[in-house]
Amino acid sequence: MSRLRILTLFSLGFFGLLTAYLYNLRTAMAPNIRTEDVAKLGAIVVGSGLAGLSAASQLISHDIPVRLLERAAKPGGNSIKASSGINGAPTKYQSVVDDAFYADTVKSAGKAMSAMTAHREKLIGTLTNSSSAAISWLVDTKGIDLSKVAQLGGHTFPRTHRGAGQTPPGFSIVSTLLKSLKESPIFHLQTSCTVTKVLQADHRVTGVEYACDDGEKQELHGPVIFAAGGFGGDAEGLLAQYRPDLAGYPSTNDPRPGTQPLLTAVGAQLIDMDLVQVHPSGFVDPANPSSPLKFLAAEVLRGEGGLLLINGKRFINELETRENVTNAIVATAPTSQSPKQWTVQLVLDEGVYNAAKSHIDFYIFKGLMRKTTIADLGEDALESIQQYASAAAGKEADSFHRTAFAHWALTDPTPESVVYTGIVTPVVHFTMGGVVISDRAEVLNGDGEKIEGLWGAGEVTGGVHGGNRLGGSSLLECVVFGRTAGDQCAEYINNDSK
Ligand SMILES: Cc1cc2nc3c(=O)[nH]c(=O)nc-3n(C[C@H](O)[C@H](O)[C@H](O)COP(=O)(O)OP(=O)(O)OC[C@H]3O[C@@H](n4cnc5c(N)ncnc54)[C@H](O)[C@@H]3O)c2cc1C
């Protein structure tokens, strides 16, 4: 009796054994599979960030076995670091009638909307119209606390959701989805395994080639959902290719090669690859100043009253947009070329500290900020802080036209005054560009046609955010398009099995 028949007989009674059969079939017997049978083997998901986990959760809900391949040793990608939250409107946590999410997203996308307008409008429509369902899926189906709502830059209303406790939203969402997936016998996660090629036959995607720690190339067969994240951490690769001016910049994203070339190799079309979001403040860790990976210095530090100094002098209204603050910094000479970074001093007083205590205590714990006195920052800094304090107290106009000083409390700074400080530098934060997808998360080729057997979701895709992603909309795109990809892939598999 052939191995295939033996395995088939065993699989009849037990679903778990069916899964094992599928895995065996995919790996050991893959060369004998006819392309029309590939879909019957379950789905392959590449990347264990929020997009991959959302897709996998949806597939499992349709009883489709999932093999998830993850390059890193630990799952979660950049998604697990997300700190502000996820957008949704309308939701039960909003106290206003929020009808502006679509319009805010189009506005933020800016000039990019003038090309492929109808396509972008459709994606943005899907993103924003599905946002309410995305939040209720996470809250009501998965039991994640997202009861706090904040208003971030570019949003007309508060719509960025996070939990009421101390756990950051990225961590609570990712860890909950992962835990629930691991309880399923038909979910199989392999970490430290990098997908190196997308396999294609008869114009449909039939699987992936991948290599794990031992470096041996293997193949896995089935339809593929690609959720491998952005290329913000690919400083010398895709970033240097599409944005030479940002080559060598550090990033808040894990350093790793971008994966879009694996998809263009099977015909995928790219969009907006030059549109990259740079954040003005990533911490330079004094213990490892040349690390290409930086910890984000949350916007709240400037918002609550913090000021920025270069060589002891202020240079901008700290409440300007991310782009304007970054431009002002990079107009000065960098202090390091590898990585390319600047030495910008972030200074807070006790008032700001008290307003953002949980953030600052964490940064102090990580060694990224320290408590000191103004004398430690030098004479120029003392003069700058005195002028800032005077403007904050309403005694004079601010030279940089800052009018809101939030919780800054120090009225008469002296060399002995206590301050909290850390060094920050601009960091690549998010890549808006990627592969073109349809509103059904199908990866599209250069003619705008879907590539059979291939879906994309999350930061690996492009076109949803145009020139500027709104804070909170990246986690949202992972959930919306990840779940859509899961549904579409399940339908493809079920149709093929009939
Ligand atoms: C510090 C920080 C804070 C943020 N805060 C927010 C926020 O509050 N709200 C918000 O909406 N967005 C936020 N973002 C952005 C958001 O977190 C990301 O854009 C989003 O999580 C991307 O999710 P993803 O699933 O597409 O990719 P990721 O989460 O990056 O996951 C991709 C995974 O694919 C794996 N992978 C890559 N290549 C391969 C390969 N060849 N083979 C196998 N696996 C591979 C990677 O190792 C990774 O684990 C933040 C980002 C950072 C860095």
Image (cartoon, rainbow, N blue to C red):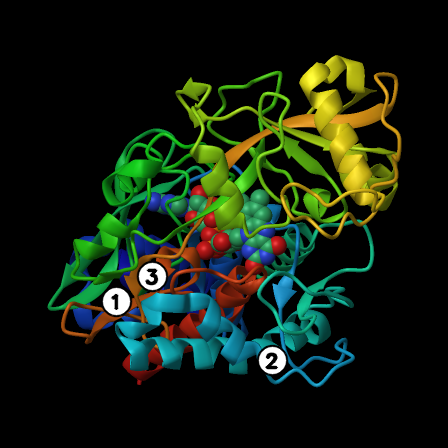
Figure check: 450 above or below 146: below
Looking at the rendered structure, the secondary structure element under dot 1 is helix
Residue closer to the observer: 126 or 373: 373
Q: Which of marks 2 and 3 is in front?
A: 2
Viewer-nearest of labels 1 and 2?
A: 2
Please tell me whether mark 2 sits on a helix, a strand or a loop: helix
Expressed as whole percent of the image width and height from the top left, the position of residue 132 reads 62, 79
Residue type highlighted by circle 2 = Ala
Amino acid type for the residue under numbered disc 3 = Ile
The relative height of residue 397 versus residue 226 in the rendered view (above or below) is: above
Query: Is residue 211 in view?
Result: no
The relative height of residue 137 versus residue 436 in the rendered view (above or below) is below
Q: Does the CB distance between marks 2 and 3 fall below 8 Å?
A: no
Residue furthest left in the image? 202
Residue at horizontal 29 percent and vertical 73 percent from the top:
114
The residue pinned by badge 1 equals 38
Which residue is identified by label 2?
Answer: 133
| Disc 2 from disc 3: Cα separation | 44 Å
- Whether residues under marks 1 and 2 lie with C-beta atoms below 8 angstroms apart, the answer is no
Measure the alpha-carbon separation of dots 1 and 2. 32 Å
Work out which quarter of the rendered image holds the N terminus and state it: bottom left
Give the quadrant of residue 40. bottom left
* Kind of residue indicated by mark 1: Val
Against 170, residue 95 (above or below) is below
Picture quadrant of residue 200:
bottom left
Give the CA separation, mark 3 to mark 1: 20 Å
Q: Nearer the viewer, mark 3 or mark 1?
A: 1
On-image quarter of the C terminus: bottom left
Give the residue number, with chain letter if any, for mark 3: 6
**Residues packed near mark 1 inside 10 Å, few (<14), some (14 to 19) or many (20 plus):** many
